[in-house]
Image (spheres, rainbow, N blue to C red):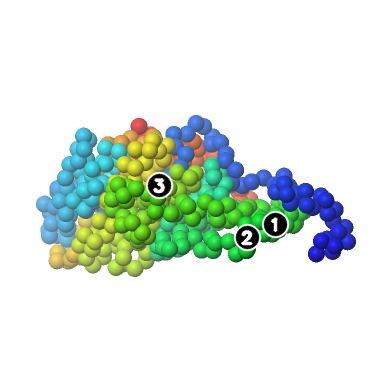
Amino acid sequence: MIRSLAAGGLLLPGCLSEMLQGATGGVENPLAPKAPHFPAKAKRVIFMFMTGGVSHVDTFDPKPVLNASHGKPKNAKSFYKGADWKFQRYGKSGIEVSDLFPHMGSVVDDLCVIRSMKNINGDHFGATIGIHTGSATFNRPSIGSWVSYGLGTENQNMPSFVVIAPQLPYAGGQVWGSDFLPVLHQGTRIIPGPEPISNMKRRAATPELQTTELQLTEYFNRNHLATRETDSNLAARVKSFETAFGMQKEAPEAFDLSKESEATLKEYGLERGSTKGFAWQCLAARRLAERGVRFVELIDGGTSIDNNWDAHAYMPVYNRLAPNVDRPIAALIRDLKSRGMLDDTIVVWTTEFGRTPTVPDPSAEGRGHHSAVYSTWLAGGGFAGGKVYGESDDLGEQVARDAVTVHDLQATILNQLGFDHTRLTYRHAGRDYRLTDVHGTVMKGLLA
């Protein structure tokens, strides 16, 4: 092979020299750390998405008037349905939280609760991609991809955008897709289990042999790329191989929770050795955030209404779903805070929409989709803790004050990361695109 390379006109000493040096070839690293537009309050995001549409009037938006109207007709075809759970005041702020989430209630002084969210679509697919991409109808890059594109990553051995999703949500992989952004910015999906990332084990017999093989491959990749410098997909593909090699060294350790103390595992409600439940996702998210991953998304639930928050027929299913997420989310907030990470980490809890405060029959036990108003909360990253922002009307049907659209939420998150959302753009198909399309306002009232 060496003789054929030399006979083919390659300068063997130069070849070996480039291989040994890593053969950077002057190609720009698309994941190199980048400075934002202005000094940032936060440098990473943990985005928790509850699939199915969590009922706002049963969780974070108490409605005494609705409860008093339970069973009364709104019109000939619908009746009011009160909350199935009571609410309690928590913390110094006295914010009311449903009995479904007592652990989240215990950290409510760190939460900025929005009771006036609006989505741009009322079906699962459109609402899910709407809150993630800013569009309910067209393929667009996910918010995690935009953050990766804007900031790069602090750890070149790990992806900049990681999604922990035991099941596929509505809209599938489009939720974490990069669309027209370079493919390296799309989310890397992790499936909890014995091997969260497939093919992490080295196939070569020795590390030295693998290094030699990869250096030779890199040499040819760089020379191939040198004649195609405008091909961003090719450059991203070359970089993806480098990231994959780095992940062999760092990813197994990042997902090895065996080194966590008994006290930490107990706080999250995670049994030692278990890789199941939202507790594993939350603790893995903290470990990824510590290791420089820019955007971590945790998805709870898939497309089966028996395993997500889409309670059309039976609201008491929340009695099973809520304990799975309540304790570990509160533990994540406390854990980040104790490590000094909450100040520069934005934690988001959201869903695609809420549930209707009315039902077609007074005996109905479920609720329908409701995108006109619902609840979301944020913590850390310069957001105001112990605060309620916005308000729905007395019946939880419409926004009464200070509406927050999905584009407003996206613009405000980007603002805390140091970006003017109108300037974080990418040229595609002859025009500049951005996460917030032509919408979005930074909601100053959410900020500390």
Which residue is label 1 attached to?
Answer: 212
Tell which circle, 2 or 1, labels the residue nearer the N-terminal end.
2
Q: Nearer the viewer, residue 398 or 192?
A: 192
Q: Position of residue 89 (x, y in %)?
A: 17, 42
Q: CA distance from mark 2 to mark 1?
A: 10 Å
Q: Residues within 10 Å of mark 2 (few under 14, many from 20)?
A: few
Q: Quadrant of the N terminus?
A: bottom right
Label 1 Cα neighbours within 10 Å, binned few <14 / some 14-19 / many ≥20: few
Per the image, label 1 sits on a secondary structure element best described as helix
Cα separation, mark 3 vs mark 2, equals 32 Å
For this rendering, which residue is in front, 310 or 193?
193
Q: Which is nearer the eye, 76 or 86?
A: 86
Which of disc 2 and disc 3 is earlier in sequence? Answer: 2
Local SS, label 2: loop
Packing grade of label 3 (10 A; few <14, some 14-19, many >=20) is: some
Where does residue 199 sit, x and y in percent of width and height?
54, 63
Q: Which residue is mark 3?
A: 286
Image vertical order of residue 94 relative to residue 9, above or below: above
Q: Which residue is mark 2?
A: 206
Residue depth check, mark 2 versus mark 1: number of the one nearer the observer: 2
Q: For the residues carrying marks 3 and 2, which lies nearer the camera in this image?
A: 2
Q: Name the amino acid, label 3.
A: Arg
Q: Position of residue 63 (x, y in %)?
A: 18, 48
